Image (tube, helix red, strand yellow):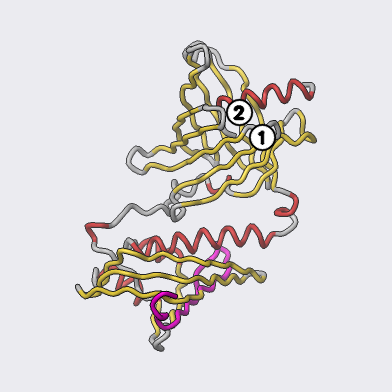
């Protein structure tokens, strides 16, 4: 395919398809965990990417940034094509319907809603697109990991799914600076994991906490109290503390080899055995890379800061 034809295809893509102390909540307020295998099936797409048409592998087509958001429950895509088109998508695994869902919108007024599932390391989503002439087209896209790259392929049918033809075939490659700095990928991974842990703490999700905490985990508070993993899980299941707020800011992640340190300022508010509390602390979380992934091994918090800090 010529370069001009390649970019014509990419234009078609753009219009139609995207490329602490223990935290407890009352059981009645618990939310579903987002750490199941199905919820994590699309994590391979997270990263900072350069995008190329497979038929023009040396011609940059777009940049894409894919991030985990909302405590790791959703995936946010920002896609910036070289011709000025910009698109964004939100992807989510819906545990109620047992399906992945994606909503794609662009700065040219395009909307696409697609649903599907993951199988054998691939995510396949499909839906109906409405063309400018009012006709409908069925679209099916597949994402799969290929080495360090992610390949996204789409096919289209204009006769209600009887005959399918190629729509586009693109590859997401790690941006050179990200590929040359593995620590940047580790930082993003640890940041997402720490956010997911804090979210689990807030809703009393002991199962997710159990998966993230190392077996020999230790927490030291500013008052000198210490807690181990069993203590935290027991408290999480007791319902003694209910958090209305557990939000951090000024987060910083640093990585040295197989060790990562997260520092942030945490605002905690809620009730402890029915008694209200509200305070802000600095905390440090230490993660260690293990054969089964990053694990939270040590936590330390400050004394409550003066009001207003």
Q: Residue 74's spot in the image, x, y percent?
A: 46, 47
Magenta-colored span: 285-309
CB of mark 1 within 8 Å of CB of mark 2?
Answer: yes
Query: Which quadrant: the N terminus?
Result: top right
> Considering only vertical position in the picture, is 52 above or below 5?
below
Residue at x-position 69% and y-position 31% = 83
Left/right of residue 187 with respect to residue 296 in the rendered view: right
Residue 185 lies in quadrant: bottom right
Pick out the residue farthest to the bottom: 224
Residue at x-position 58% and y-position 46% = 66
Q: Residue 297 lies in magenta, yes or no?
A: yes
Q: Nearer the viewer, residue 266 or 3?
A: 266
Residue named by callout 2: 14
Label located before the other in sequence (1 or 2): 2
Residue named by callout 1: 81
Separation (CA) of disc 1 from disc 2: 8 Å
Residue at x-position 40% and y-position 79% = 228
> Considering only vertical position in the picture, is 170 above or below 286?
above
Residue at x-position 56% and y-position 19% = 156
> Considering only vertical position in the picture, is 296 above or below 166?
below
């Amino acid at each position: 395919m010529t370069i001009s034809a390649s970019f014509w295809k990419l234009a078609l893509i753009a219009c139609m398809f995207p490329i602490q102390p223990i935290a407890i909540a009352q059981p009645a307020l618990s939310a579903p965990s987002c750490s199941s295998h199905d919820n994590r099936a699309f994590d391979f797409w997270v990263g900072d990417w350069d995008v190329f048409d497979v038929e023009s592998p040396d011609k940059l087509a777009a940049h894409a940034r894919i991030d985990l958001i909302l405590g790791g429950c959703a995936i946010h895509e920002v896609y910036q094509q070289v011709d000025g088109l910009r698109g964004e998508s939100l992807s989510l695994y819906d545990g109620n319907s047992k399906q992945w869902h994606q909503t794609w919108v662009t700065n040219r007024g395009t909307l696409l809603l697609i649903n599907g599932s993951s199988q054998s390391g691939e995510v396949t989503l499909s839906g109906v697109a409405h063309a400018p002439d009012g006709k409908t087209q069925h679209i099916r896209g597949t994402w799969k990991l290929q080495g360090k790259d992610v390949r996204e392929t789409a096919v289209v049918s204009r006769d209600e799914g009887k005959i399918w033809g190629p729509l586009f075939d693109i590859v997401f490659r790690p941006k050179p600076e990200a590929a040359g700095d593995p620590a940047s990928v580790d930082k993003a991974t640890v940041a997402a994991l720490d956010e997911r842990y804090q979210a689990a703490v807030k809703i009393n999700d002991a199962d997710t906490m159990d998966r993230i905490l190392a077996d020999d985990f230790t927490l030291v508070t500013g008052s000198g109290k210490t807690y181990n993993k069993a203590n935290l899980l027991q408290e999480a299941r007791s319902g003694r503390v209910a958090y209305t707020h557990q939000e951090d800011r000024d987060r910083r992640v640093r990585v040295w080899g197989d060790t990562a340190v997260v520092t942030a300022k945490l605002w905690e508010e809620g009730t402890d055995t029915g008694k209200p509390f509200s305070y802000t602390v600095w905390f440090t979380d230490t993660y260690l890379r293990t054969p089964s992934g990053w694990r939270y091994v040590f936590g330390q918090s400050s004394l409550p800061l003066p009001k207003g800090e």
